[in-house]
Amino acid sequence: MIRLPQLHRTRVSLFPDPETALQDPNGLLAWGGDLSPERLLAAYGQGVFPWFNADEPILWWSPDPRCVFRTDGVHLSRSLRKQLRQSNWQVTADTSFSRVMHACAAPRDGQPGTWIGDDMIAAYEELHRRGHAHSVEVWDRGSLVGGIYGVAVGRLFCGESMFSARSGGSKVALAALCNLLHGWGFPLLDAQVTNSHLLSMGAVEVPRAEFVVQARRLAAMPGVTGSWVKYPLALP
């Protein structure tokens, strides 16, 4: 029987080596600890992230392979780009972080529940207040039609979730975010777990060992902290 490591109560930066994570389920690394800003930032900087349901303890993951976007490599279809040219959509950053999180947490077709519970929302809202968690919002005449949120550690951005209230909303948010990050010298957006939707937009898989090396290097570099609300974003 495999014993999953429990995180230390007070040594918040201490995580097991990601290479010791389970193969089944893929990437399960440890359990326990808390969702304090210090522990979350330490986790992301080591290629680890929390993911758990409301009836579970806090679970920490580092899957292999890892799904990432090169920030200059997001693909939007020609039909979506044509739609954008004919639309009144606008994009902003950090103007409605809580609304984006709650929209990402809302029930979706075919899904019985959400992993973005009250504890997760409270934890990431605190990271946002401290200038480490950020959102990009897509608007149509004042209505929020899409968005994405995640955590910036140094020059690594770790995407957490995105949503669409209108077709293409999440894709536009992701592309606008990556354009902003690329201009700041952030080479990667961590998308965590692969799915066909992400791959169709240009995401690639990299071995976990390679990703962890890059994550640690990028997390140690100076980033862009504080609110991003003052930075203008353009439609992709």
Image (cartoon, grey):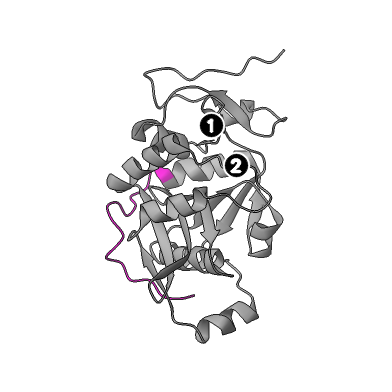
* Residue 229 located within the stretch drawn in magenta: yes
Disc 2 and disc 1 in contact, CB within 8 angstroms:
yes
Name the quadrant containing residue 233: bottom left
Across and down, in percent, residue 112 comes to 64, 42
Q: Nearer the viewer, residue 40 or 95?
A: 95
Name the quadrant containing residue 185: bottom left
Numbered badge on residue 163 = none
Q: Amino acid at mark 2?
A: Gly
Alpha-carbon distance for marks 2 and 1? 9 Å
Q: Which residue is mark 1?
A: 54
Residue at image position (54%, 30%) is 60
Q: Nearer the viewer, residue 7 or 115?
A: 115
Across and down, in percent, residue 19 comes to 62, 30
Q: For the residue carrying disc 2, how many other residues have a C-alpha within 10 Å: few (<14), some (14-19), or many (20+)? A: some
Q: Nearer the viewer, residue 204 or 26?
A: 26
Q: Which residues are magenta?
A: 219-236
Q: Which residue is mark 2?
A: 113
